[in-house]
Image (cartoon, rainbow, N blue to C red):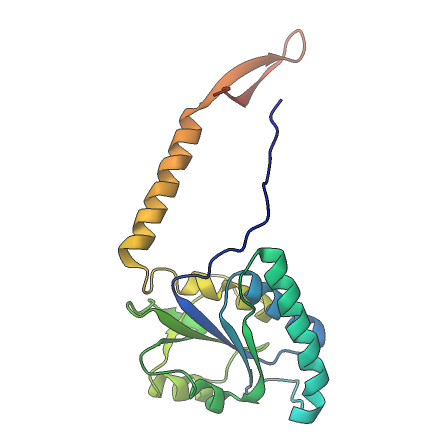
Amino acid sequence: PLVCDAGPRRAVPGPAQRVVLIYCMPKGNAKLDLAVRGATEVGVAAIHLAVSRRSVARPTAEAFLKRLDRLERIAQEASRQSGRAAVPDLLPPAPLAEVAARAPSSARRLVCAPGGGAIPPGGDEAWVVVGPEGGLSDDELRALEAAGWSRVSLGETILRTETAATQVRDVTVGIGVGAEHDEQAGAAAHRIGEDIAGLRVESIDVGQDHQIEAAGRRAR
């Protein structure tokens, strides 16, 4: 029999690239909880909450203080669960234009929207905007693009806003990683190839007239 020993828990080092999520306020507290938890688990360095034209939730700064405490606890729990060494910064909601202006010009500035183009190369920091239910308005998209933001796509399907928040690292794959990322991907592919080569097909008798083919791993 095979015994899997996970070993002691250890902190996972932060990613080489710093990714900041600008998350437009969704409808309902549960979606915001899921977005913060998921973005933390995938390694986002900071979460800046924003209020856009289609945001239903528009809390005042005073009213959001108690909510912010809960979100910070969620981020702390998600960091522990995922083995992260650091908890992402979490900033309270502000108008989208104000939040977007915080991004340095040296960073890759990306806005997730249908019909987005290719991801621009270069840079070791990326800021990514995810809109609320219904997405960003045309005026907001045009204003961001005029300010130097690039429209990118999360794929062919339309995702829920809380799901999109967990995909921002996938959007930025390859930016600022370069040869190191290619080398790691190649090594992973090689390991998978070795694992496949180590499999053999065995014929298992399951009756007088029936057999099935099952994959079994050779003992090493």
Residue 209 horizontal/vertical position (percent)? 64, 8
The quarter of the picture where residue 37 lies is: bottom right
> Where 220 sits versus 61, above or below?
above
Q: Can residue 132 be seen in the rendering of this structure?
A: yes
The quarter of the picture where residue 152 lies is: bottom left
Residue 158 horizontal/vertical position (percent)? 53, 66
> How many discs mark residues in the rendered view?
0
Q: Can residue 155 be seen in the rendering of this structure?
A: no
Along the line of sight, the residue nearer the viewer: 209 or 117: 117
Identify the residue at image location x=47%, y=58%.
13
> Where 147 sits versus 47, above or below?
below
The quarter of the picture where residue 33 lies is: bottom right
Along the line of sight, the residue nearer the viewer: 163 or 69: 69
Relative to residue 112, is residue 53 drawn left or right?
right
Identify the residue at image location x=33%, y=64%.
175
Relative to residue 96, is residue 37 drawn left or right?
right
